[in-house]
Every structure is written in structure tokens, then in C-alpha cells.
Amino acid sequence: MEHLINPHVKQIEISGIRKFSNMVAGTKDMISLTIGQPDFPTPEHVKDAGKKAIDQNYTSYTHNAGLAELRQAAANYVQEKYLLTYNPEKEIIVTVGASEAIDIAFRTILVPGSEVILPGPVYPGYEPIIQICGAKPVYADTTGNGFRLTLDILKKYITEQTRCIVLPYPSNPTGVSLTKGEILEIAAFLEDKDIFVLADEIYSELVYDQDHFSIGTVLKDKTIVINGLSKSHSMTGWRIGLLFAPQYLAEHILKVHQYNVSCATSISQMAALEALTVGKDDALVMKKEYIKRREYMYERLNSMGFELVKPDGAFYFFVKLPGNYHNSFEFALELVEKAKVAVVPGSAFSSLGEGYFRLSFAYSMDTLKEALNRIEQFLISSK
Ligand SMILES: Cc1ncc(COP(=O)(O)O)c(C=O)c1O
């Protein structure tokens, strides 16, 4: 019967990150720098709000788009922080993580044959959904420009079929962001085009060298902004994402969401309400720590001779393989075997990531120090 399975689903591969971590799971005394989630616990007051929600019987379905108070809190939060203006009644949907927001956004706007431009290397969560829609991911090569998509690069990939451009900044895996000027240029170009923008801004609270700027402030009628609490409040397991879109579009996205999940978990929504109000600046403590780690790692990696771009957001370094290596999977495997350090092969982030590896700094300083010592030893002995 396997031949009857939807060919679009058959075509999807399991994530390269998962493939690699499965392969090395169980290696003794290994330090892993592979994880893409904060190493801090969810703030206590947010956890308490979740516990209270159970005790107070917030255990039934909510409005499909999410609790009204939570949508209001989300509207206030993005207005205050990023100058984004959305009507909580018609333009905001609370989703099951940013992942569901990506899924329902693509399924609403894509048809077979649509093309979606992804600035590569890129987070591997977009391609499979695009493929399920029968649409085509088109990778824009940003490797020659410090991993940043500029208007000039973008223009090379636009065709009659282009239906959407993904702007995933700050970026996983590269940690880079676009400047306000670069975003304004792209927005001005798209102003008169029938092309949507999916702005995945899940790392917007973790920007280090500039203020986060969202294209949704200047191109609202074509933009779907995706955010959530996974990274800002260390709530990956609570599964709360946020989707912001103009009313004409949100109305349709909401139908896909409704028949997909009905609503996000009520208990998590109550915790999210606490996070976006009382805890609206909870990310600052983590951000301070990430900045320290970033400086430390940048210095160490530089002194080892690695070629890299300093990240100004998220918690990743995307580093060029040492000169004698060309295959990122083989390099990562050798690093596990010889140095007992796990990193993510760049090829997990599209073929444009080949030739690089990703290090996460969502780990304690002690762990990072030990991992870098091991990598340094590995480099010396493999020369
Ligand atoms: C760029 C990006 N978008 C979306 C997600 C998914 O977020 P969530 O866990 O809220 O579904 C991740 C998770 O790592 C991510 O890095």
C-alpha cells in the first residue's frame, strides 16, 4: 500500500538535525552543542500561572484564535516592542508553537506550482510544508553576503511563480539580522508586487547589536509575522506561537488553524498571558547571558582560525569548516568520534549550508569552555 501515500509527503526527508542527533545519541561523555532551545527554565511566575490555570479549571477549548485576553496582550506586546499594529479580534491567531503558524500560513497562501524564496542557509522547518503544498522552495544564496538577503540577491530569484518570500531574521542557523535599511528596500520593492512575506521573527527578543525591525510595520497588507514564546520565555514545550496578519488573510488562515488544532492548549495560553504581560521583559536576563557567551565564543573561535560571521541575534554560530574538510556531515561525525563534541552539520540547513557547521550557545559557560577546549585539541591533532 505504500505506493498510495501522498507523493509530496514521501518526498519529505527527516530533518538533518534529527538524523545527526539520532546517529550520535548514546556516545559516552559527549558534549552536545546541537540544541536550539534556551538552557534556562521557564520563569517561575509563568510556570505558576500555568499551574493556577489547571486549578482554576482553564481546561476547556478556547476561542479558535486564542483567549481574547491573550490576543490583546500579544497586540500590546508587539506594539510596544516592535511598533507592529494588529487588531486582536481579527488579526492575531494563537498557534501551537511557531511551527503551526508556519504550517497554516503556507497552506493558506500556496497552491501547486507556487514558488517560495528562502534565504539559504535556512531553518529546515519551511521546506517540507512548502513541498506538502505541492509548491517549490527556491533557495536564494546568501553565502557571499554574510548570510544576509539583500534586494539585489532577492531579485535574481523572483519569477512569475513567486508567491512568498521568507524573511527569517534573526536567523537560525546563522544568527544574522537584516538592518532596517535593508528591510525597507525589500519592502519598497514588494509594495506593488503580488507576493507575500512570511516574517519568522521567533528570535526577535534576542537581538544584540541593533533594535529588531519588522517588515510588518511597513508592508502589513502582504506580510504574515510569526512569533512565539519558545525562545523569548524559554517555553519550547508549552507550544505557544503567535501569528499576525491583515484581516483579509487572517480570516482564511484561521479556518486552516481551526480544522487543524481547534485551539492552542488552554493551560499554556494562560501561562503565555502571564509571560506577555508581567513577564514581557523576561528575555532580558537570558539575553545578557547570551551576549557574554557570544563574546567568549567569538574570541575563542577566531583565535582557533575559524572563518565566521559574528551573530547579532539568536544563539548560534555558523562556522566555516576547517580548510581540510569539505563535507559537513563527515566533519561533525569525526568531531563526535575524536573530540566527543556534537555540532550540527551545515547541510541540515539546505545545500547552501554545506561547508559549515552550527554551534549553539544555549549552554552554560562551563559547557561551552570545555567544548571549545576539545575542538581546539581536535584541530591541533588533525593538522
Ligand atoms: C527560525 C525558527 N522558526 C520556528 C521555530 C519553531 O518554533 P516553535 O518551537 O515555537 O514551534 C524554530 C525552532 O527552533 C526556529 O528556529
Image (spheres, rainbow, N blue to C red):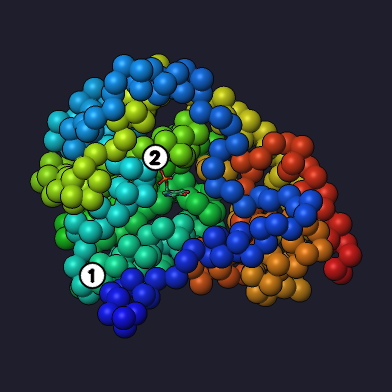
Q: Nearer the viewer, residue 252 or 376?
A: 252
Horizontal side of 3 relative to 32 (left or right) equals: left
The residue at the point 55 percent across, 47 percent down is: 36
Q: Position of residue 214 (x, y in %)?
A: 34, 41
Q: Residues within 10 Å of mark 2 (few under 14, many from 20)?
A: many
Labels 1 & 2 near each other (Cβ < 8 A): no
- One can see residue 190 in this view: no
Q: Amino acid at mark 2?
A: Arg
Q: Which mark is residue 149?
A: none
Q: Amino acid at mark 1?
A: Ser
- What number of labels is visible? 2
Q: Quadrant of residue 126?
A: bottom left
Image: 71 above or below 264: above
Q: Quadrant of the C terminus?
A: bottom right
Give the residue at the far right of this rendering. Answer: 381
Q: Residues within 10 Å of mark 1 (few under 14, many from 20)?
A: many
Q: Position of residue 175 (x, y in %)?
A: 54, 49
Q: Quadrant of residue 151?
A: bottom left
Residue that mark 2 sits on: 239
The residue at the point 61 percent across, 41 percent down is: 362
The residue at the point 24 percent across, 30 percent down is: 60
Mark 2 CB lies closer than 8 A to ligand 1: yes
Q: Which mark is residue 114?
A: 1
Q: Position of residue 212 (x, y in %)?
A: 42, 37
Q: Quadrant of the N terminus?
A: bottom left
